[in-house]
Image: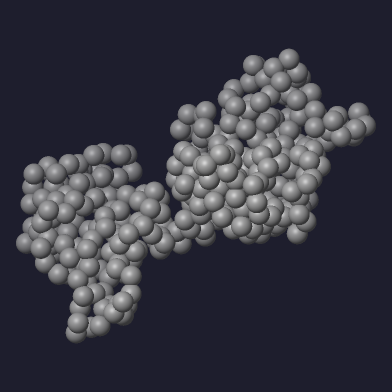
Amino acid sequence: MTETAPHVGKTVELVALNKHFGAVAAVDGVDIAIAAGEFCTLLGPSGSGKTTLLKIIAGYEEASSGAIRIGGRDVADIPVARRNIGMVFQNYALFPHMSVAENVAFPLEMRGVPAAERARKVETVLDLIGLPGLGGRLPRQLSGGQQQRVAVARALVFDPDILLMDEPLGALDKNLRSTMQAEIRALHRRIGVTVVYVTHDQEEAMNMSDRVVVMNHGRVEQSGPPAALYDRPANAFVARFLGDCTLLALEPDTQAGGFRPVLGGAVVVPFSPGWQPGAPRMVAGIRPERLRIVAAGEGIPARVTDVAFTGPDYRVDLEAGGTALIARVPNLGAPPARVGTAVGVDFGPGDLFLVPAVS
């Protein structure tokens, strides 16, 4: 694969951005600052506003209010063709009657780039994405993964400042999707373009991103590095959307000046960050991999209600004093427990996160 000199994409700033379709606020007061060269993923359920936001950045939709700045420049009145943005769609949007090389060259042709330079750039970018020598094929002669690479090549061939990707891997099977995630991430590291990526797949967002922006009902619920959002979610929506978790009630701890989670009818695990009178009511969350299954008679009494094999681990559903819990236990060759058996569960203060009781 030919080495290319990395270039740094431009910053993207969305300031107090709103988009209304009649009475519906598809984008509601969004503020996001994306650094130059950052891989930023917009993550959320269907209808959360992430694709609408991407279309506003690209120029396919006009914001109702607010500002869009690329490289510090307001682009609200700049047409799509002049924003120097590459776009990759879920359905690839390749021209079926054109060869791979013609598809990739199309944006250059529209920009009036001379034929000799077009040919050179096409050859370079096909080499970059791992498809050298396939320029003469038609899209139907390629696999799904190869077609996706061609779509990426077409979006990169004119050296965009920003690469927008709208659920580009949604049509691929799981194994190919994992391969393409790694390839896109490696390509991003090599060329340094700013990427704004849309997905509803939590695992995909966590694997690929420098920053994840979690959206819901047109609003940003939380933005930050994937690990920070997973370990320290801002609210119950983010906690639950990013993965399995159990939320536990809290009881004031007057002696310590804080509070403790309640599980199985008992107050357990002192946890005291200083809950002050009048402060918002909080609940404690715990992820399945932080919950430890121990022998019956140890920890908090619990009963196994289900065991599911996932390959790398087992998902174990438990019940403790009326509270449903989920644990994930590494696959060490045998199930960690049988359905219906009595066990204990254990965790420590460092295994918990706090979120407002109402999200």
Quarter of the view holding residue 259: bottom left
Residue at x 64% of width, y 58% of height: 15
Left or right of 117 on screen, residue 174: left
Q: Nearer the viewer, residue 213 or 309?
A: 213
Residue at x 8% of width, y 44% of height: 340
Left or right of 44 on screen, residue 35: right
Quarter of the view holding residue 261: bottom left
Q: Is residue 139 above or below residue 186?
A: above
Tell me the quadrant of the picture where the N terminus can be found: top right
Q: Is residue 343 above or below residue 135?
A: below
Residue at x 69% of width, y 55% of height: 67
Q: Residue 164's x, y, as percent?
A: 65, 42
Q: Is residue 107 visible?
A: yes
Q: Is residue 74 above or below residue 85?
A: below
Q: Residue 70's x, y, as percent?
A: 73, 53
Q: Nearer the viewer, residue 233 or 225?
A: 233
Left or right of 74 on screen, residue 255: left
